[in-house]
Image (cartoon, grey):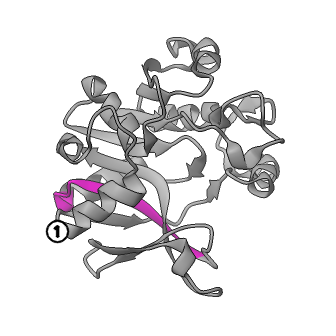
Amino acid sequence: MKALILSGGFGTRLRPTLSDRPKPMALVLGKPFLEYLIRFLRGQRVNEIILCLHFLADQIMEYFGDGSHFGVSIEYSVEDKPLGTAGAIKNAEKYLEDTFYILNGDTYLEIDIKNLLKYHRAKRGIATMSLVKVRNPQRYDLVKIREDGRVAAFLEKASIKSGREGYINAGVHVFEKRILDYIAGEVEVSLERQVFPELVKREEPLYGYVANGYFIDIGTPEDYLRFQSDVLRVIKH
């Protein structure tokens, strides 16, 4: 099993806190956030990693190299222009096998990915996303799931009332390669706004796996700083 990490983010919401590096390279106790994700994967015996890059890609490639220093093998898929979360995956198609993991480069979730994979295979889905329950999820779109775990709908954050709780996409996925048939090449395409809703519309088997581990999105200065204080408690060394 290979894992692909979406690592091309500009980190716009973190400026001016973060202005000289791509968002996955935001430092947490002196190490790039992306390094914590790579060490997380290695700890779960996922040693073949593809990094999807765009903004300041050279900075990431120089730091991680071929991955051997971190106990993994790293390949790079570099976009000439921003392709969005789905377009970046399509751009990396030549590196991918039938089933693979996808991680967001700006979120961290404590999850046993072997259990996520087992659930995905049992459901025979085209894709399975990890979900966490949050209160007041107005920063995120909500994911509605049926009793069997199948994704039924998405609610955009603009329509969510204050005080409502629900499930959000926690940024760790298992995909079947045939999902790439739903992604146009060489254009900007969003998983969240275009591909996932299209799968639901076509009644493709898209599932949600509810996780209970620690979750954080470092996309805002507040949460980025919170992870700085949480990391020693959360990360298993």
Residue 129: name its quadrant. bottom left
Give the residue type at disc 1.
Answer: Glu
Rendered location of residue 92, percent (x, y): 34, 28
Q: Is residue 97 above or below residue 120?
A: above
Report helix, strand or loop for mark 1: loop
Q: Measured from the top left, where is residue 30 in percent x and y?
A: 80, 30
User: Does residue 73 appear anywhere in the picture?
Assistant: yes
Q: Nearer the viewer, residue 63 or 83?
A: 83
Number of residues whose C-alpha sits closer than 10 Å to that of mark 1, classed few (under 14), some (14–19) or many (20 or more): few
Q: Residue at 64% of width from left, 56% of height from top?
A: 216
Q: Pointer 1: what residue?
A: 203
Please identify the quarter of the rendering in which residue 137 is found.
Answer: bottom right
Region in magenta: 122-134
Q: Main secondary structure of the magenta part?
A: strand
Judge by depth and name the residue closer to the eye, 70 or 139.
139
* Vertical placement of residue 185 versus 110, above or below: above
Residue at x-position 83% and y-position 41%: 16
For residue 130: magenta? yes
Give the residue displayed 52% in from the left and 19% down from the top: 71
* Residue situated in front as seen by the camera: 3 or 186: 186
Q: Is residue 80 left or right of residue 25?
A: left
Left or right side of 10 for 128: left
Q: Is residue 127 above or below residue 45?
A: below
Q: Is residue 30 magenta?
A: no
Would you place residue 40 above or below residue 138 in this image?
A: above
Q: Residue at x 69, y 44 (%)?
A: 12
